[in-house]
Image: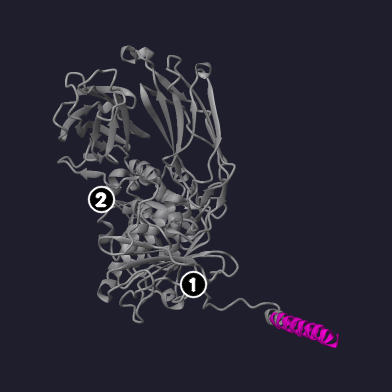
Amino acid sequence: MKGCVRRLAALCVVLAVIFSSSVIFAKPADSNEYEYRYPFSSDISMTGRYSQMSESFVTGNWEILEASLVLEYAATPLILNQKASLTVLLNGNPVTSVPVVKSQGARQSVRISLPARSVQTKGANTLSFQADFHSDGEACVDAASQSNWLNVFRESAVQIRYRPLTPCTNIAEFYQCFSSIEALSNHQSAFFVPPNPNVQELTTLALASGISSAAVMDYQNLTLLPAANAQDVLKKKYAVYVSGYERLLPEIKAAMSQNQQELAQKGTVLALVRLGNTHLLVLTGTGDLSDAGIVLSNPDFMRQFLSDTKALSDSEEYRMPESAVAQYVPLTESGVLVKGNFRQTADFYVEYPKNRTLSESSEMSLDFRYAENLDFTRSLVTVFLNGQPVASKKLTKENARGDHLVFSLPNTIKITGSFSVKITFDLSAGENWCELTAEEMPWAYVEKTSMLKLNSIDQSELLFENFPSPFVRDNSLDHLVILLPDSPNQADLTVMNRVMMTLGRYAKGNRGSVRVAFFSQPGDLKEANVIAIGTASRNKIITEQKKLLPFSFQADGSTVLSNSKMLVDPQYGTTLGIGQIVRSPYSGTVRKALLVLTGANDSAMLKTADSLGTEQGLWALTGNAFAADPDEVFCYEYPIEEGNSSMPAKKSSQPSDNRSVLIWMAASVFSLALLSAGLLWMKYRRKRNL
């Protein structure tokens, strides 16, 4: 069987830095303190006489009590102990230099104290590492030798002891607490609905999926749970409860103030209450609750609510302004400096809609300058796109104070969605580089005027490489309909919630449309991108579109059947979660998609959420169908077939048009055949007469 391969490794590393789910938390004895351990995103190798690397980590609104770095590494056995060193910088400021000890290449560990006051609680923190070591040879001869190496292992980690500072006394603070690092990593946040939620409550939650974009990491831990009683809600520290006013639990209604209750009886309200030790945001009302979900998908707006109550009005606009896909994108907002001998690198990550593929005439304009003391016979700049070289230029002394490189992005490299740009400078300082002082150290600077001109086309291929396209188009949900069994169980809600949290991650705005419906009343699907969720025996689409879907099930839905690319044992088929994306048979001439997430049972179906419900799982998917067992995910690409809708077709104002066209075409072909036969008969008759 063909296993899934990870795509765009460079992007995965960047995403892992920001969104890694491997953050480890532990609760110290003091209940107001936490410990935060952030492992490195990957193993990193440093080679050459001088080498440098960097790693990033983020924090929350915390009081940093203590910070340290645990570094796991192995170094070449050829180093000279008295000269080899590793310098650590935090946010550009030197922290310490430690000797690199010779140990025949064996793994070593060192703990380095980091100044707590230097850890930023807004934005990302950058740890930089500069290796400087000689091998047992002439110092100026082995500068670029691959025998000089230092491997830093991913088990290295930043460790922080901290105390959260957000008090959670109003809606804005609750929003921050609900999606905070410590809350999500400790599974302290959840959405709740009444038992047997209706489509309005579920649609409100689907519209609120944009809240995942406010989470720095671990957004997949925003769970959706039914609350049969108040004790269910009390299991979480932070909770969002969505319910029509008439269906509110008595304990929750009693916790609301009189003003909050009166506002809920007149319309829709966001009410922050305290229920035991739980901070609870209640989204309720007597009318349509959809505006409440739209508001939750607008992080900037939610941070403006500085009271415990927000009544929503039909006269207010809660959707974010519509923004076009940017054509001109700056490479860096502030400029980037690199310094040191030999190869120095500046890495950039360009966010772009996942449904967009770069087209011809896309360009990059790179502005940069560099030191004038280089050996210009051996110094150059090279640009890499997703790890592939695309342009280079030799550095010259005449242009040192202001150089420029403009080139077209090659159409031989297919770039869809976000991508990475790496700028490398090979800086050779001549024969006496060993004697250079810090002031004379070669350097290069990427100017903030550097720009990308991005022309793109809408990506129409229905492949998981392009997911969440077409469900998210140009950063907005695109006419999305979620179909669920008539009485969705916990597994159905979990899959829906986790997929929606991923879609919300990519939907940068809240202007898109989404609707939840049950299979018995799907509503109008002619212009909809459809996601159908449910086990094979409860998913109506499985039987309706059996010929269209690559994977099918036994008539009773008990197991997955073999197909042209995967041989499935009946017992093994009961363990497989199946995800498959095809052209929607309901959309007619409008090209929309149908995604079916299913399995023979709930535990099998839940495996589809492990792939589509996390960014790490999503990056592993290829093709248009996958089968996930308890240990592995298998991806396949099947030919796209057009299916027929079992839904009633829209009546035409001229119902006989199609039939008339067919009759006319048949008559025309028959007439031409008769005419041709007649002409041939006359031709050969004339020849015989001659």
Q: Amino acid at mark 1?
A: Pro
Rendered residue at 86%/85% (across/down): 690
Secondary structure of residue under mark 1: loop
Q: Magenta stretch: residue 665 in it?
A: yes
Q: Amino acid at mark 2?
A: Asn
Residue named by callout 2: 277
**Image x and y of residue 111, in percent:** 17, 30
Q: Quadrant of residue 234?
A: bottom left
Q: Magenta stretch: residue 656 in it?
A: no
- Magenta residues span 662-690
Residue named by callout 1: 522
- Image quarter where the N terminus lies is bottom left
Q: Main secondary structure of the magenta part?
A: helix
Measured Cα–Cα span from mark 1 to mark 2: 40 Å
Rendered residue at 53%/40% (across/down): 409
Q: Is residue 387 left or right of residue 236?
A: right
**Image x and y of residue 496, in percent:** 38, 62
Is the C-beta separation of discs 1 and 2 under 8 Å? no
Task: Please state which of the two labelled residues, at mark 1 or mark 2, is closer to the viewer.
Answer: 1
Q: Earlier in the sequence, mark 1 or mark 2?
A: 2
**Image x and y of residue 298, in percent:** 47, 48
Secondary structure of residue under mark 2: loop
Q: Residue furthest right?
A: 690
Depth order, front residue of 408/276: 408
Residue 23's tag is none
